Image (cartoon, helix red, strand yellow):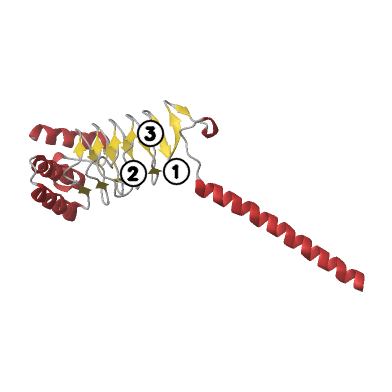
Amino acid sequence: MFQLMKEDVRSVFERDPAARSTFEVVLTYSGLHALWAYRIAHSFYKRKYYTIARFISQLARFLTGIEIHPGAKIGRRLFIDHGSGVVIGETAEIGDDCTIYQGVTLGGTGKEKGKRHPTIGNNVLIATGAKVLGSIVVGDNSKIGACSVVLKPVPPNSTVVGVPGRIVIQDGRRVEQDLDHTNLPDPVMEMIRQMQEQIASLQQELNQLKNGGAASGDSDL
């Protein structure tokens, strides 16, 4: 337990340039507090003391603003930066050396039973406000952009952005969307494009009607 705590503190210094001293990190970093409370709650959860486990997790949520279900499986050296609003579901799994920023949700998509939360690989970064939903796998060394909504599996070494999330870089190379079958179309952008085309068409028809009316008025005179 103490070895894990030392690793957690070291990971803060490695990934947060604002960290100045061990005393400051241990005393003030809510991400660390939530993670340590989770480990205590998880130990009770594995022994089927579910009520005690949930009480500890809810107490940690009240104190830190970070909700980690005690049933989740979290690897070593997870760094939750700032952390306010982070939610990690019951069947979520997180690998080693991952980084999660504030407002991230690792959640489900409905009332399905069994494995209903995502599996996050090793060395994955999930940026501010991102939502990773459903029983999907995010591969090792991937990055999820801020405010992205990820609903489909992500291959290793990928960068995902947008709503819905789409792969823009994989294995260090930019992905051409029209050639990559793993990318989903963006329905919001498509709807906006169609609306712009319709507005332009209506504006053209309106101008034609105005011009026709003006010409008719001139002929009457």
**Farthest residue toward the front?**
113
Q: x and y percent of residue 102 in the render? A: 29, 47
Q: Which residue is mark 3?
A: 154
Judging from the image, what secondary structure is the residue with disc 3 in?
A: loop
Of the numbered discs 3 and 1, the one sitting upstream in the chain is 3
Residue 24 in view: no
Q: 154 left or right of 64? A: right
Mark 2–mark 3 Cα distance, whole angstroms, equals 12 Å
The type of residue carrying mark 1 is Gly
Q: Amino acid at mark 2?
A: Leu
Nearer mark to the viewer, of 2 and 1? 2
Q: Residue at x 44, y 43 (%)?
A: 162
For label 2, the residue is 133
Res. 130 image quadrant: top left
Kindly check if marks 2 and 1 are in contact, taking CB atoms under 8 A apart as contact: no
Spatial separation of the CA atoms under disc 3 and disc 1: 13 Å
Could you tell me the amino acid type at mark 3? Val
Local packing at callout 1 (Cα closer than 10 Å; few below 14, some 14-19, many 20+) is some
Q: Toward which corner of the image does residue 14 lie, by quadrant?
A: top left
Q: Are marks 2 and 3 in contact (CB under 8 Å)?
A: no
